[in-house]
Amino acid sequence: MTIEKIAGETSAKIGTACSRRHFLKGATAAGALAAFGLAGCAPKAKNEMAATGNAPSNAADINWDEETEVLVVGSGYAGLAAAYEAAKAGAAVRVIEKHKMAGGNSVYADGQIAVVGSAAQAAADIEDSIETFMNDALTAGLNLNYKDKLQLMGEKSNEVFEWTVNEIGVEWAQDDATGAAQLIAQGGHTVTRCIPPLENSGAGIVKPLLAKLSELGVEVETGTQLIALVRDETGRIVGATVAEGCSDYDPATASSRTNVKTTRGVVLATGGYGKDVAFRSAQDPRLDETVGCTNFEGATAHGLKVALDAGVMGMQLDQIQCYPYTSPEEDSFGCAATWIEAESAYAPTIDPTTGKRFVNELTDRKRFCDAMFEVGTPLLQIGSVDNVPDWCAESLENALAAGVTREFSSLEEIASEFDVPLDGLKAQMDSYNACVTAGEDTEFGKLFNPDAKPVVTAPYYVTRAWPKVHHCMGGVKTDIDCRVIGNDLEPIVGLYGAGEATGGVHGACRLGCNGTLDCLVNGRIAGQQVAALEPVA
């Protein structure tokens, strides 16, 4: 069985196993996991078998089996950044991950990051500011974002980017002309500030972080799930109950349960709940089982429910983002999404019933998806060989190999295949290409990449696009120091949160590349803060 199947990124419709970036393409499951350091370590053997029902949540009722200073729950960007900073500070750290391999949903992410004031922007003479960054995020987020968190992210964006390069060893794509990092346009950003990793996948960030943790003696324990948070008589979090050896993300299948005492604290980095249809549709009834999802199978509300049971305040749980770049021909994220998103900076997206554009292809995801749902039928992205930058050429190859993106020799052929009005299509392509040549989109105000060219040369690359659930903006409430807030609106001592597990950062809509930034900035802060917390006996 291939690792693509294990990762759950199969497509029943096209019969092709396909991970987001094919970053494990061609490897066997065991070999790939070991080679990339994503497999984690096997759960510790226990004699006690797991039992169903709730675990004790009061310290007075607990017999501790193990002890650590810091327990990090989740091994995506946020969890790994938190674990690294805590371990670097000298704390004893344990990291658990309910998935069968380390990295969580971050492994399947683009890995692109938004950076304000980078050397790449300076090399390209691009002016940017914290205020512009915040305004972009607030516009997309409908002003539901917490401004202090946005400002902190913007201020620390270049610092965290340099940290990934100089301390963690992440490799980012480079611009051949300047030698600086590659800059790309992303939806909702009014300034070009986003940088893709060289590997063109979140694995390009996850793997170096795992390697750095391994150097510090910290390994990720996979198949291990949080069951309960434990509070003492003062209300402080002093430990957790975890289920080890779980299969299919079900604690009832665990080989054992372990009560882990934490002398400093717990970091919640459990990600979102996009794959949890029952929970997400309870928050937003539109997002029922008929709507697909880009996330891996473990993206459920399990960790969030544990936190809520412990008295944590949840916030903005109905703010769930759909992703406009996926194909209805594929299950989950599939192969084409990476190409569709990359090509959105270059190619028009067409309503097949009219042959016309209907939206700025680089608007934020909420506005893009809302416009798509209003059209009511899958859309056509029409790119060409003129606009295939080196950094996304492999994405195109993967989409073509999967049969989801198709080549056409003319606009006439496209119109015939998809029943598009030919006159409308030709007029629209002429208009769009004139905008690219002029460097200004007079139709919808799209921000063109500097290397964008008119879409005029066959072969044309056509991909159908339709939204899927992608990111949960809501989660547990935290303060600026990543301390988790309780229902009494006070910080819960010994409990921290970062990444998609938390709410308030992105408001109603997360801008592309801000997710990576959020996870790394706040993951680092959570790790630093928990390591500095006065320990309990």
Image (spheres, grey):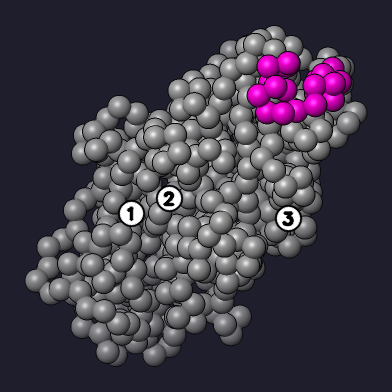
Which label sits in the foreground, 2 or 3? 2
Specify the amino acid type for callout 1: His
Q: Position of residue 134 (x, y in %)?
A: 75, 49
Task: Say which element carries label 3.
Answer: loop
Which label sits in the foreground, 2 or 1? 2
Where is residue 180, by image quadrant?
Answer: top right
Q: Which residue is mark 2?
A: 296
Does the residue at mark 2 contact the one at mark 3 (Cβ under 8 Å)?
no
Task: Say which element carries label 1.
Answer: loop
Q: Position of residue 358 (x, y in %)?
A: 81, 38
Q: Residues within 10 Å of mark 2 (few under 14, many from 20)?
A: many
Q: Which residue is mark 1?
A: 99
Does the residue at mark 3 contact the one at mark 1 (Cβ under 8 Å)?
no
- Segment colored magenta: 411-430
Q: Which mark is residue 125?
A: none
Q: Which mark is residue 141?
A: 3
Regarding residue 455, the answer to whether it shows in the image is yes
Where is residue 445, by image quadrant?
Answer: top right
